[in-house]
């Protein structure tokens, strides 16, 4: 058994050394490696930070996600049309060349953005900036590329979504929470409005200088600036994509699916930029994920579902330019879902009575989460780009951390009672015969 | 003996102005225009590249092609020619399929080239 005195000595030592570590980071001469340098390269917003590492992560964020699309499915189709044949190079050549350079290319679509990504050795920056510029300025929207490559991959993405009840529930939760705009389906559910002509038209709307941002991790800012000016000079000027400002409605959705059962309980969250730190802490306070193996975790949600073997309840948050969604995904064996849901809702309601220590723990986790995300260089570039396009600034990790440190138990409780006062969103996907209704769980819809 | 010099000479003649008149005359005499076909309808289909090119045709072009073939088949069965106003006019005889075939051949050549890359020491 541990002697009490030795334990307390270790703890106090830990506390004493903690500030010393943070001081050494601050004193580690030169600029903060997490700090994004922002500038305007002839109308294109760029941000970069250079930690001196041998590889670079580059993301080209285009404000053209599903909330801005002119017709359903265009954002998804546009994303699948990236890295295809251009006037200068064929799709195959770009792939083989980036392989030869040891790089990786990819793309993703979200409700806000279509993102082109590349990771490569730092000396290859010009090649990848040029390749990204080619995608924006000279992609050929050929009808046979659409039918041979783009449409089948879109179909495949949709199949993957349908096979995952929790992802499908999240889609329906967005629909119930925001109706249009952010509530629109992320993926194309049919090709009714999608054809090479409409995709090319959408591309010409969103591929313009004020609607994109280039974000790099591990690249010198001057270099990025130079190559952006050189290769993106041909891109036309235009205006930022806009959509009606988001209103939170809340509501209930039930969808039957054979893939499994899952439901989502959601509340309005915080946007990014104009981030509210107490919502971030609240997400970690609810938690649900474990940091230690073979253990259910000690957050509010983990404790709530501890008595229901196989059930998991995890709180997460997504940030958009003018709204956010804090959602709790509940998954598990059908028979336990209703009882577990009641326990989860009780845990959410009890947030207003949470202790000071719990909040401190959540603040520590939130800080860790922010900093580890910043250290993982490819994660988080999209949010930086989103903020750059929105208001020309990049969210800086130290500012976010400071805001999180300033959160108090009272501010978290206030945020919690704020969201609990409004309407909740509930989306259930799976076996509708056993899935509970929002009313059964005690949710106010 | 190789036929290459003869072929070269023919190609040279073919690409001159006189050649273009000869070319037009040859196509006319070939007779496919009299049963309403286009030159590209005569390209052999029994080839994976051509099969793929046919798949890439826009729906309208593909429909028209099938229509022309059925009409030509009918002419052939009944041993008749189309009335002159329905026959293909020289200006309508455009290569609608060849560009797709060329694109596919280019893609194939590019793939082969990229597959055969070797490291230079």
Image: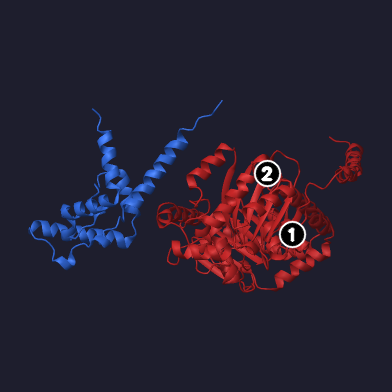
Drawn side of residue A231 relative to residue A95, left or right: right
Task: Name the residue: 20% across, 53% down.
Answer: B27
Of residue B80 and residue A302, the one placed in the foreground of this image is B80
Across and down, in percent, residue B49 comes to 32, 45
Of residue B26 and residue A334, the one placed in the foreground of this image is B26
Q: Which chain is red?
A: A
Q: Which image quarter: residue A400?
A: bottom right
- Other-residue count near label 1 (Cα within 10 Å), few / some / many at <14 / 14–19 / ≥20: many
* Chain letter, disc 1 residue: A
Relative height, residue B106 to residue A1 (above, below): below
Q: CA distance from mark 1 to mark 2?
A: 28 Å
**Residue that sits furthest to the left in the current view:** B79
Q: Is residue A435 visible in the rendered structure shown here?
A: no
Indicate the colouring scheme. by chain
Across and down, in percent, residue A226 comes to 70, 50
Of badges 1 and 2, nearer the viewer stands: 2
Q: Which residue is mark 2?
A: A56
Relative height, residue A214 to residue B85 (above, below): above
Secondary structure beneath dot 2 equals strand
- The image's mark for residue A280 is 1
């Amino acid at each position: 058994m541990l002697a009490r005195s030795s334990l307390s000595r270790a703890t106090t030592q830990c506390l004493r050394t903690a500030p010393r570590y943070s001081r050494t980071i601050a004193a580690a001469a030169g600029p903060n490696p997490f700090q994004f340098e922002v500038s305007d390269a002839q109308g294109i917003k760029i941000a970069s930070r250079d930690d001196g590492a041998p590889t670079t992560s580059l993301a080209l964020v285009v404000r053209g996600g599903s909330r801005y699309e002119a017709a359903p499915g265009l954002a998804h189709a546009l994303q699948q049309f990236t890295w295809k044949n251009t006037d200068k190079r064929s799709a195959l050549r770009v792939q083989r060349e980036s392989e030869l350079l040891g790089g990786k290319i990819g793309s993703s679509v979200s409700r806000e953005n279509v993102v082109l990504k590349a990771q490569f050795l730092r000396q290859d920056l010009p090649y990848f900036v040029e390749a990204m510029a080619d995608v924006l300025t000279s992609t050929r929207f050929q009808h046979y590329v659409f039918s041979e490559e783009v449409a089948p991959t879109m179909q495949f993405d949709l199949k993957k979504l349908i096979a995952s009840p929790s992802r499908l529930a999240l889609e329906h939760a967005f629909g119930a929470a925001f109706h249009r705009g952010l509530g629109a389906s992320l993926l194309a559910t049919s090709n009714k409005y999608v054809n090479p002509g409409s995709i090319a038209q959408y591309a010409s709307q969103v591929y313009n200088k004020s609607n994109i941002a280039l974000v790099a991790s591990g690249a010198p800012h001057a270099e990025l600036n130079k190559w952006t000016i050189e290769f993106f000079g041909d891109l036309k000027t235009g205006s930022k994509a806009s959509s009606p400002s988001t209103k939170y409605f809340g509501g209930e959705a039930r969808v039957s699916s054979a893939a499994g059962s899952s439901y989502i309980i959601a509340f309005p969250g915080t946007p990014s930029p104009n981030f509210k730190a107490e919502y971030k802490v609240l997400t970690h306070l609810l938690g649900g994920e474990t940091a230690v193996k073979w253990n259910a975790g000690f957050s509010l949600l983990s404790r709530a579902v501890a008595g229901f073997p196989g059930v998991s309840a995890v709180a997460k948050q997504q940030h958009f330019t003018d709204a956010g969604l804090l959602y709790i995904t509940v998954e598990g064996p059908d028979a336990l879902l209703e009882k577990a849901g009641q326990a989860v809702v009780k845990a959410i309601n009890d947030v207003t009575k949470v202790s000071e220590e719990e909040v401190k723990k959540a603040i520590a986790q939130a800080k860790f989460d922010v900093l580890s995300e910043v250290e993982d260089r490819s994660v988080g570039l999209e949010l930086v780009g989103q903020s750059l396009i929105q208001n020309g600034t990049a969210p800086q990790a130290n500012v976010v951390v400071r805001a999180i440190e300033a959160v108090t138990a009272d501010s978290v409780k206030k945020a919690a009672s704020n969201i609990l006062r409004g309407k909740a969103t509930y989306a259930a996907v799976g076996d509708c015969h056993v899935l509970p209704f929002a009313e059964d769980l005690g949710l106010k819809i | 003996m190789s036929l290459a010099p003869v072929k070269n000479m023919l190609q040279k003649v073919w690409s001159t102005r006189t050649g273009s008149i000869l070319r037009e005359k040859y196509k006319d005499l070939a007779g496919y225009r009299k049963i309403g076909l286009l030159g590209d309808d005569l390209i052999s289909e029994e080839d994976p590249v051509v099969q793929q090119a046919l798949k890439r045709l826009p729906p309208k072009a593909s429909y028209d092609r099938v229509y022309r073939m059925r009409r030509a088949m009918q002419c052939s069965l009944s041993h008749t020619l189309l009335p002159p106003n329905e026959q293909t006019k020289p200006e309508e005889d455009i290569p609608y399929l060849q560009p797709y075939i060329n694109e596919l051949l280019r893609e194939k050549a590019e793939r082969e080239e990229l597959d055969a890359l070797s490291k230079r020491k």
